Image: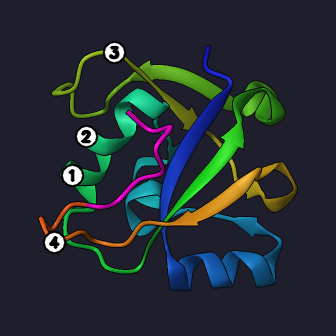
Amino acid sequence: MEEFIYTLVRTDDWRAARVAGAYHGSADDRRDGFLHFSTNSQLRASAAKRRAGVTDLLMVEVPGASLGGSLKWEPASSGSRPGLFPHLYGALPLAAVRRVVPLPLGDDGLHQFPPEIP
């Protein structure tokens, strides 16, 4: 559906993924049974809802097509957010990652995204 999808990862979790060769998800991901991703238009709201105030956050960008049949487009598990969200059922291979961008907090307390994220 979207060319690129995004997941938000803490720096220490990303370091562990680099050692392992794959990202296996946060505690929330493991509890839910899939890795939570967002489209570029969903990303800011996802960060505000699930990662507000996190100072060591990274935005991981992945071409959705590189994930094959393990990627499913589904409603948010909470049902509180409209639209379909990309969910990855399996580990994220690091070879699929296009880029990783730090997301510092701005003076307003919100994460500062690259300009192409609306």
For label 1, the crowd category at 10 Å Cα-Cα, with few meaning under 14, some 14 to 19 and many 20 or more, is some
Kindly report the distance in space between the C-alpha atoms of the residues bearing marks 3 and 2. 13 Å
Kindly report the distance in space between the C-alpha atoms of the residues bearing marks 4 and 2. 18 Å
Q: Is residue 34 visible?
A: no
Query: Which residue is tagged 1?
Result: 48
Q: Is residue 4 left or right of residue 8?
A: right
Q: Which mark is residue 83?
A: 3
| Quadrant occupied by the C terminus | top left
- The location of residue 115, given as percent across then percent down, is 46, 44
Residue 57 colored magenta?
no
The residue segment tinted magenta is 111-118
Kindly report the distance in space between the C-alpha atoms of the residues bearing marks 1 and 4. 15 Å
Residue type, mark 4 in image = Asp
- The location of residue 111, given as percent across then percent down, is 30, 61
Could you tell which of marks 4 and 3 lies nearer the N-terminus? 3
- Residues under numbered marks 3 and 2 in contact, where contact means CB atoms less than 8 Å apart: no
Kindly report the distance in space between the C-alpha atoms of the residues bearing marks 1 and 2. 5 Å
Query: Which residue is tagged 4?
Result: 107
Query: Which residue is tagged 2?
Result: 45
For label 3, the crowd category at 10 Å Cα-Cα, with few meaning under 14, some 14 to 19 and many 20 or more, is few
Residue type, mark 1 in image = Ala
- Residues under numbered marks 3 and 1 in contact, where contact means CB atoms less than 8 Å apart: no
